[in-house]
Amino acid sequence: MSIYRNLIVAGALLPLMSAASSLDIEERRVAKATQKLPDISQRYQPIVTDFIKHTPSYDSISDRQAIATGNQLWQRAINDVQQQQLDDRPLYWSRLQLRAYLKELDIVNHPEHNKGPRAIDILENTAAALVILTIKQTITMYW
């Protein structure tokens, strides 16, 4: 009987194991960073938590929410820099938390689709576009 129970438990864990194996090496380090560097890795946690709360399922992932979250993270990072808090690691760890969440959500719920990576691309591209825009604004302001 215990062999069958173990097989059932192992079968239930397969999607989660698949999700964990899809995480890149940086995304797998999030849990350790949360333990070792909580003030840094969780500085923007309310933004991450809000995104997760509004995307509880695969079907709820929206481009609008991904863009809004990317903007919120970026604005928070800009505010930190303006207040002379020059450590960019909170932004780094928040992005990794969101990427890991989206990958896990995608694989566990719909391994045949590819919606999670699209949201990851939107989050990443929003941040990159905002970096370029900020650099252009800074150059214009000082030149």
Image: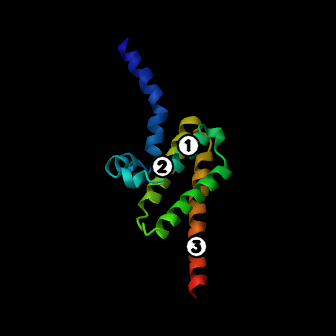
The residue indicated by pointer 3 is 134
Residue density around tag 3, few if under 14, some if 14–19, many if 20 or more, within 10 Å: few
Residue 12, x across and y down, in percent: 47, 26
The residue indicated by pointer 2 is 45
Residue 128, x across and y down, in percent: 57, 66
Which residue is rendered at x = 50% and y = 55% of the image? Answer: 95
In front here: 125 or 140? 140
Amino acid carrying label 1: it is Ile
CA separation in Å, label 3 and label 2:
23 Å
Q: Is residue 57 above or below residue 80?
A: above
Q: Is residue 36 above or below residue 53?
A: below
Q: Quadrant of the C terminus?
A: bottom right
Amino acid carrying label 3: it is Thr
The residue indicated by pointer 1 is 52
Q: Are marks 1 and 2 in contact (CB under 8 Å)?
A: no
Q: Are marks 3 and 1 in contact (CB under 8 Å)?
A: no
Residue 10 quadrant: top left
Q: What is the secondary structure assignment of the residue under circle 2?
A: helix
Q: Nearer the viewer, mark 1 or mark 2?
A: 2
CA separation in Å, label 3 and label 1:
27 Å
Residue 120, x across and y down, in percent: 57, 53
Mark before the other along the chain sequence, 3 or 1:
1
